[in-house]
Image (cartoon, rainbow, N blue to C red):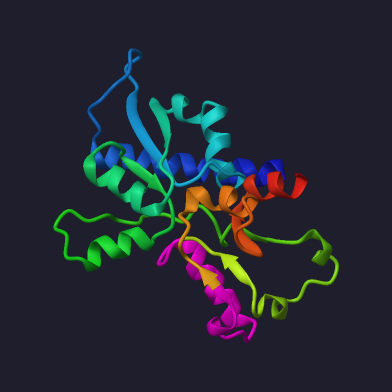
Amino acid sequence: MKKIYYIVGVITLCLVSFIAVYFGFKDKDDNGNDKLVVAEVTHSVFYAPFYVSLHNGYFQDNNLDVDVILTSGADKVASAVLSGDANVGLSGLEATLYVYENGANDYLVSFSSLTKRDGQFLVGDCSLKDNFDASMLKGKSVLAGRTGGMPSMVFEYALYKNGINRKEVNVDNSVDFASLSGAYIGGNGDFVNLFEHSALIITLQ
């Protein structure tokens, strides 16, 4: 496992280093390192390789001073990059597509895939853990995230792969990504889409 983290961490380091060189960032810290601001859509174990590189000093070893800001929602990540508040965004690629399709002259470029699969978990009544079946979602309300967001789209794809018509499930897109946990704890929805560690926190309550 440590070897895998090391390999992925090195790949992450190379990608971020490439950005710094390619775009030629001019801001430097007191030690002469290039300053790089990364906007992440959520703070999750999903991005563990990035955190390993960050906290083990791999970026600093390559003259990069990386500052991470939390900007919940891919749309907010895109806004941070487009406005210049961030140099790089960690999020789903849907924002890149939406900005480009709207005809923006200054559009985003998706250059990397840090994860192989989507990192969300479907959280619900713990009494179902030993015999859960996707068909149990029929007639239930699921807090899936905002319309057009990656969590919602991936969830609907999962329904499709399991032969469930979207109309058979109440897919609730009224709650934004950052508010999903609170809404579910507050009694909204029978199930909710969450990333770790939010999923774990809810199941332990």
- What's the residue at 59%, 50% (across, down)? 181
In the picture as drawn, the residue positioned furthest to the right comes out as 130
In the rendered view, would you say 191 is above or below 54?
A: below
The quadrant the C terminus occupies is top right
Front residue of 69/25: it is: 69
In the picture as drawn, the residue positioned furthest to the top comes out as 30
- What's the residue at 66%, 80% (across, down)? 138
In the rendered view, would you say 107 is above or below 67?
A: below
- What's the residue at 56%, 74% (across, down)? 170
- What number of labels is visible? 0
Front residue of 156/1: it is: 156
- What's the residue at 51%, 30% (across, down)? 58
What residue span does the magenta drawing correspond to? 146-170
Q: Position of residue 144 (x, y in %)?
A: 54, 64
Res. 191 image quadrant: bottom right
Q: Position of residue 130 (x, y in %)?
A: 85, 67
Res. 136 image quadrant: bottom right
Front residue of 139/83: it is: 139
In the picture as drawn, the residue positioned furthest to the left comes out as 105
The quadrant the N terminus occupies is top right
In the rendered view, would you say 168 is above or below 177?
A: below
Q: Position of residue 70 (x, y in %)?
A: 44, 38
Q: Position of residue 31 (x, y in %)?
A: 35, 14
| Side of 111 relative to 202 (left or right) | left
On whether residue 156 falls in the magenta region, the answer is: yes
On whether residue 114 falls in the magenta region, the answer is: no
For the stretch drawn in magenta, what is the main secondary structure?
Answer: helix
